[in-house]
Image (cartoon, rainbow, N blue to C red):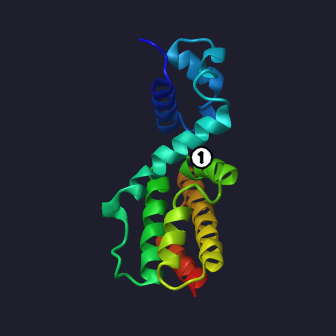
Amino acid sequence: MALDRDRVVDAAWHILQSYGLGDLSMRRLAKELGVQPGALYWHVANKQELLAVLAQRMVAPLETPSVRPARNTDDDAAALLLIARFRSAVLAVRDGADVVSVAHALDPLGMQPVPLLVTALTGRGRSPEDAETVALTLTRFTLGSVTAQQTRESMDLPTATMDAEFEAGVRAILA
């Protein structure tokens, strides 16, 4: 079977889900695919690009129209719904916050959920500058919250209060 970008990304996704980000090296990925590491660079420029593609895969469901808030939802409720769905998508993937953080650092305004949040917040009365600031702040808060939760889970520490703490933090940012 010929090596292509989809096979590279699928294999990387499998390693990430099965073993975590710490085991996702280009060398390991090449071994999994039965190729030399240099062959991967025909399909992804570097590991950062690979992580960005994995992050986009992780948050792709946010771009589905059925996942977006209804147009008549007020801005705080719409933002809360979008950011909660983003959090769920990232939490569902082992080391998801670390992967999305790399992609977010590379393209903070282009990586979901920021564009969706900016659109939702701007369409509901906030200035574009304010909407962008709120969207970036919510996204970065969420990534920090997910990192903390995934770290606690990996150490078998309790996470029972983290959902409520997260929602309180989001509401504080929106206020």
Residue named by callout 1: 99
Q: How many marks?
A: 1
- At x 60% / y 22%, what residue is drawn? 28
The image quarter containing residue 21 is top right
Q: Residues within 10 Å of mark 1 (few under 14, many from 20)?
A: many
Q: Is residue 24 above or below residue 58?
A: above
Quadrant location of the C terminus in the rendered image: bottom right
- At x 41% / y 84%, what residue is drawn? 74
Q: List x then y, in percent, for residue 78.
A: 43, 76
Quadrant location of the N terminus in the rendered image: top left
In-front residue for pair 102/161: 102
Q: Is residue 106 above or below residue 65?
A: above
Q: List x then y, in percent, for residue 152.
A: 57, 57
Q: Is residue 89 visible?
A: yes
Q: In this image, 85 relative to 48: left or right?
A: left
Q: List x then y, in percent, for residue 2.
A: 45, 13
Q: What is the three-letter code of the residue carrying label 1?
A: Val
